[in-house]
Image (cartoon, rainbow, N blue to C red):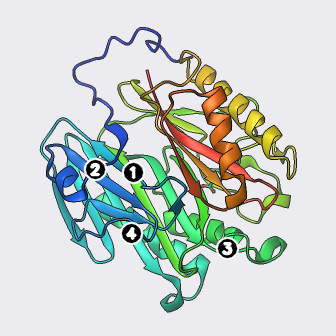
Amino acid sequence: MIQGCENPQIDPLLRRAPRISYRLADATVALKEPGTLALFGFGAGSPGSDDPRYLRVALECFDAPAPLEIWQVDAPVIHGTDGALHWSAGGGWLFAAIELDESRLGGPSATAQLAYEQLHRFVAARGAQHVLRVWNYLGAINHGEGDAERYKHFCDGRAAGMGDFFAEGFPAATAIGHRGDPHRLQVYLLACDQSGTWVENPRQVSAWRYPRQYGRTPPSFARAMLLPAQDALAISGTAAVVGHASAHHDDLDAQLDETLTNLEALLASADMTAGFDTHSTLKAYVRHAADAPRVREFFRQRLPGVPVLLLHGDICRSELLVEIDGWRYA
Ligand code: 3EB
């Protein structure tokens, strides 16, 4: 069990978690604020910016106007680009993002491999870094049957490209299908010069131990990651998976209930108090646009006051209708 979470006596030598928030703000203004490490817009209508800290995520947001997501640290931030990769760093934290066009690279496996090789090379060159959290957004994720499904090819390429990148343990992660240009792969990460604590969910088989029926290459992620000062939990994409099986096929309400049970189990597993609050920025990825109002109603009733972004995204198993990820501060 993890010590010191209930009453965090934060060691001043440990890196305080970045502040993650959603804000209806002007991108230029948000980028000028001191300590802005990363800024995200959602969907084709979101602002454009050449600042390396900015990423336009290829997922449409059901909220109009769509807020921006902002990551802030208590330190000066530097930034740059390196080929297809853009990055920023400050206060011991590192953000890196890469966007690749599959049509020039020979399919989802080769593209994922290249993305992870380039991220690995870049992060390794910056010295001792621990990748704590990764987000993957790919097009047409459920296209293809069985082993030919594009998500399975993505998992192959990710495993091939990471090499020994995550030798100390897999980061927390999300992998979601977007409805934009099907050839576009977006991968971004948060790393730190201090390590986190891996958290698994006792209700779920660890993803890297999934049986063969889910693909040749099991997905490589931890269910959650406690940040170095144990002041925040980075929660991976969480769905209605119990054991290794998908529960409540095609039943949105039951999947939402099961997902919330999984999220609470993760908090307990991290020795955190139960529940989510007004600082717990969550994202709900919703497969069918028509389900968005019901998902919103679920949050209103079950997680009142919790900031949630509703995004149009496909979950990597076609029977799953919704997935939730995000942050819980201690
Ligand atoms: C699951 O529980 C749902 O491939 O990186 C969730 C989070 C899922 C991350 C990934 C996949 C990934 O298996 C799917």
Task: Give the CA separation, mark 3 to mark 2.
Answer: 37 Å
Q: Where residue 270 sits in the image (x, y, percent)?
A: 56, 23
Q: Earlier in the sequence, mark 4 or mark 2?
A: 2
- Vertical arrangement, residue 11 with respect to residue 326, above or below: above
Q: Nearer the viewer, residue 64 or 100?
A: 64
Task: Tell me the crowding category of disc 3: few under 14, some 14 to 19, or many 20 or more residues within 10 angstroms, Cα based.
Answer: many
Question: What amino acid is at disc 2?
Answer: Ala
Could you say whether the residue bearing mark 1 is in a helix, strand or loop?
loop
Q: Are marks 1 and 2 in contact (CB under 8 Å)?
A: yes
Question: Do residues under tags 3 and 2 come within 8 Å of each other at their CB atoms?
Answer: no
Q: Earlier in the sequence, mark 3 or mark 1?
A: 1
Alpha-carbon distance for marks 3 and 1?
Answer: 32 Å
User: In the picture provided, is 140 more to the left or to the right than 54?
Assistant: right
Q: Is 54 above or below relative to 2?
A: below
Amino acid type indicated by mark 3: His
Secondary structure, mark 3, is helix
Does the rendering let one see residue 304? yes
* Residue 315 appears in the picture as rendered: no
Labels 1, 4: front one: 1
Position in image of residue 166 (x %, y %): 49, 51
Q: Which residue is mark 2?
A: 25
Q: CA distance from mark 4 to mark 2?
A: 24 Å
Label disc, if present, on residue 67 of the rendered structure: 1
Residue at screen point 52% across, 63% down = 60
Q: Measured along the vertical axis of the image, is residue 36 above or below residue 159? A: above
Question: Label 3: which residue?
Answer: 153
CA–CA distance between discs 1 and 2?
7 Å
- What residue is drawn where x is 66% and y is 74%? 140
Tell me the quarter of the picture where residue 50 sits: bottom left
Sooner in the amino-acid sequence: mark 1 or mark 2: 2
Q: Nearer the viewer, mark 3 or mark 2?
A: 2
Q: Residues within 10 Å of mark 4 (few under 14, many from 20)?
A: many
